[in-house]
Image: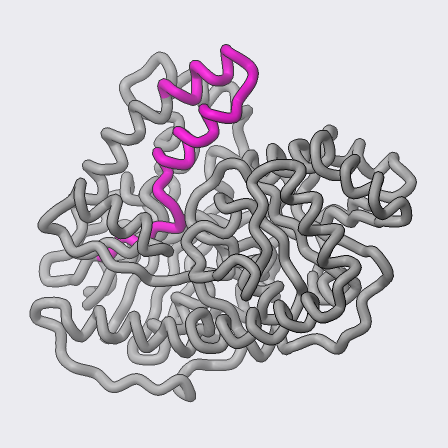
């Protein structure tokens, strides 16, 4: 069996949620087939990262960065506003990537072709007889619609609204080109099933390695709370500004010695500015988030927009860190409020949950144990890999193939 995976970024190093989902997806396919990966190279991919991927894949082809990383964003946005094609198209499509993909598909016939994210479906990739799968990390047009709702600048709001309308039409048309579509949550699955019938749409949950995020020792720092994520992404950036403006002052009033760490990504200027406060640290990119998780009494996920599911919540639950989130932040994950996580959708409720978890050791322990159990049963790569194989075996014309977690190479 041979599988081609077409991706908008390298899945390694594992420094953001999209890379983690893609990395585990590749390992799952590599358990029963030879995998060829064609992906854009991103800023943190060195030769060692490529060699690691080559230890999993039969072949790895890296193409220079996508237009979104190499061209001024405003130029791409302007082209999306005034032309027939969307900003999403101009951000991801390049002749160089198509040529690299053409060379690969001319040299090899594949049983399965997986396209990661709808924007990559603009590339010509089809082969007769192959099973064509679109793996969505979120519904992009829905993410755009949610950003419209929280955008205060009227010009930016109008531009986002236009892009949402244009890309909804394009994204649904792209989805209809595939034999099967995967979404990360049941909510997104049900939404697309109504729009794409009779195309099969199934849930393939995000997954993590519970051995890598093993249950931590109980050694958090006093009154330490932490945000972990790609801080330059719009949804995370908006959530952080919302947290600092409306939630953090309420927490400080109750816990004067609280300390907040913002970990990860390439922080923009407004996020870096939070680090000027004496009780806030902005780290930027880190090689390993686990020491920061281990130091935290609570993880915060104050998101108001976004799509898909938050891998950082799953990692925190696996690691045994009490987590406080908005409902949007925890969307798509089978958590129960008060059992695995604490949910608050107003600044007052969110801040009250933080204060409570900082002071209640019994609550900390309950969330720690039950959160870890949820990850082991539902969101480990072993469990999700078995689900993937069931979908593949049920696809028309596909041979039945056994799959064992031991077949996967370790991270």
Which residue is nearer to you in this view: 222 or 231? Answer: 222
Q: State the image coordinates of residue 192 (x, y, percent, origin top left).
A: 23, 45
Quarter holding the N terminus is bottom left
Query: x%, y% of residue 90?
Result: 39, 29
Report the magenta stretch's main SS: helix
Magenta residue check for 161: yes
Residue displayed at 45% across by 21% down: 77
Residue 274 falls left or right of residue 351: right
111 with respect to 219 (left or right) = left
Q: Say above or below: 79 vs 179.
A: above
Vertical placement of residue 85 versus 223, above or below: above
Relative image position of residue 36 (x, y in whole percent):
35, 65
Rendering quarter of residue 271: top right
What residue is shown at x 35% (from left), y 26% (from top)? 164
User: Which residue corresponds to the image point at 47% horizontal and 70% vertical from the top-left?
Assistant: 54
Q: Is residue 104 visible?
A: yes
Which quarter of the figure is the C terminus placed in? Answer: bottom right
Q: Is 327 or 30 nearer to us in this picture?
A: 327
Q: How is the image coloured?
A: one colour
Q: Quadrant of residue 287?
A: bottom right
State the residue in front, 58 or 182.
182
Task: Please report the bounds of the magenta region as a residue range.
Answer: 133-162
- The residue under the point 10% across, 62% down is 129
Q: Where is residue 189 shown, x and y percent of the image?
A: 27, 52
Image position of 62 (left or right of 292): left
- Is residue 111 within the magenta segment? no
């Amino acid at each position: 069996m041979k599988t081609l995976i077409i991706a908008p970024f390298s899945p390694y190093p594992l420094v953001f949620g999209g890379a983690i989902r893609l990395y585990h997806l590749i390992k799952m396919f590599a358990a029963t087939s030879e995998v060829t990966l064609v992906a854009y190279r991103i800023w943190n991919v060195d030769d060692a990262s490529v060699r690691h991927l080559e230890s999993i894949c039969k072949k790895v082809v890296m193409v220079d960065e996508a237009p979104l990383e190499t061209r001024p964003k405003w130029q791409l946005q302007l082209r999306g506003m005034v032309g027939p094609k969307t900003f999403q198209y101009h951000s991801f499509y390049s002749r160089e990537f198509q040529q690299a993909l053409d060379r690969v598909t001319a040299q090899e016939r594949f049983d399965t072709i997986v396209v990661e994210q709808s924007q990559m479906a603009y590339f010509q990739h089809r082969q007769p007889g192959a099973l064509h799968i679109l793996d969505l990390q979120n519904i992009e047009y829905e993410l755009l619609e949610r950003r419209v709702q929280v955008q205060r600048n009227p010009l930016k709001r109008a531009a986002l609204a236009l892009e949402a309308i244009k890309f909804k039409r394009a994204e649904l048309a792209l989805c209809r080109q595939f034999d099967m579509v995967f979404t990360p949550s049941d909510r997104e699955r049900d939404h697309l099933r109504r729009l794409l019938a009779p195309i099969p749409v199934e849930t393939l949950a995000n997954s993590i390695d519970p051995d890598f995020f093993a249950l931590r020792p109980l050694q958090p720092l006093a009154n330490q709370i932490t945000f972990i994520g790609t801080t330059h992404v719009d949804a995370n950036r908006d959530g952080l500004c919302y947290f600092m403006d409306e939630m953090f002052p309420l927490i400080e009033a109750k816990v004067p010695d609280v300390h907040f760490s913002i970990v990860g990504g390439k922080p923009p200027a407004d996020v870096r500015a939070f680090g000027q406060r004496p009780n806030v640290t902005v780290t930027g990119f880190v090689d390993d988030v686990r020491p920061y998780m281990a130091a935290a009494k609570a993880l915060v996920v104050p998101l108001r927009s976004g799509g898909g599911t938050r891998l950082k919540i799953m990692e925190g639950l696996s690691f045994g860190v009490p987590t406080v989130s908005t409902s949007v932040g925890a969307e798509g994950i089978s958590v129960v409020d008060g059992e695995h996580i604490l949910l608050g959708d107003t600044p007052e409720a969110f801040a009250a949950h933080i204060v409570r978890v900082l002071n209640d050791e019994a609550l900390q322990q309950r969330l720690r144990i039950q959160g870890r159990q949820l990850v082991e049963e539902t969101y480990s790569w072993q469990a999700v890999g078995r689900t993937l194989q069931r979908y593949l075996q049920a696809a028309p014309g596909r041979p039945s193939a056994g799959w064992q977690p031991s077949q996967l190479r370790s991270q």
